[in-house]
Image (tube, coloured by chain):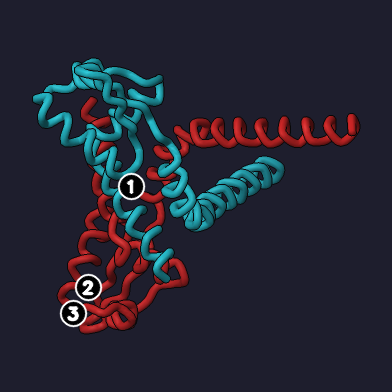
Chain colours: A red, B cyan
Amino acid sequence: MVHHRAASHKLDAVTAAISHRTRRAIIDRLARGPARISDVAQPFAMSLTGFCKHVRVLERAGLVRRTRRGRNNTLELSPQPLRKVAHWVLQYEQFWNNRLDRLEQFFAQQNQKAQENQKES
Amino acid sequence: MVHHRAASHKLDAVTAAISHRTRRAIIDRLARGPARISDVAQPFAMSLTGFCKHVRVLERAGLVRRTRRGRNNTLELSPQPLRKVAHWVLQYEQFWNNRLDRLEQFFAQQNQKAQENQKES
């Protein structure tokens, strides 16, 4: 139970971390490779202080690692926690797929009807 | 751009909605079928008012539909927004898989070494 709760806390932090488009954009940038924090911050229309708050949320969720080398802070993607999100959400894959299956069935039936009508006419 | 922003707002709402274990537990319960709000609330150690706040977050994210029939409110899972989360997170699947590939490679090499050592001895 304790272990389950810890895993749940972790999933809370990771899903909250990815619930802001700026933080998703940082993940997207770091997926192309590690980079200096000032270079990652540059395209975002916000103060470096504001940007660093987002980085800290990602660090706490275990999604980003920061290496301090004097004034050159380097950020690196740490993708493993995203796997937990994928694992949780893919439990429900059958539910959105079932609906798609029903839609496909519907269109297949419509198609069959149209072909039958063509034969009859 | 407007469309992209709207999609991003939506993903913000859905990921924020699933960032609380109570809301994930509600989704899990409704995956077993639609149910009356009072029945869904019953196992949770919180007031109905507190519970309803969580339901409203899920409704706003499009994850739950509520049907009002007098005093019998029924809740139903609406799984489609979870698909968007899966789509976003699976973009990064290669990053956690690459690491697994490297681990597999490592164990395969260890195995090969062990077999070679056996032959030599």
Could you say which is closer to the camera, residue B115 or residue A26? A26
The image quadrant that residue B34 belongs to is top left
**x%, y% of residue B104?**
57, 48
- Residue denoted by label 1: B14
The furthest residue to the front: A121
Q: CA distance from mark 1 to mark 3?
A: 27 Å
- Residue denoted by label 2: A51
Q: Report whether A108 appears left or right of A3.
A: right
The image quadrant that residue A17 belongs to is bottom left
Q: CA distance from mark 2 to mark 1?
A: 23 Å
Q: Nearer the viewer, mark 2 or mark 1?
A: 1
What amino acid is found at the position of numbered circle 1 in the picture? Val
- Residue denoted by label 3: A47
Q: Report whether A55 appears left or right of A81.
A: left
Circle 3 SS class: loop
What is the number of the mark on residue A82?
A: none
What amino acid is found at the position of numbered circle 3 in the picture? Ser
Tell me, yes or no, if residue A10 can be seen here: no
Residue at 33 percent across and 77 percent down: it is A40
What amino acid is found at the position of numbered circle 2 in the picture? Phe
Q: How many marks?
A: 3
**x%, y% of residue A115?**
83, 35
**x%, y% of residue B41?**
20, 21
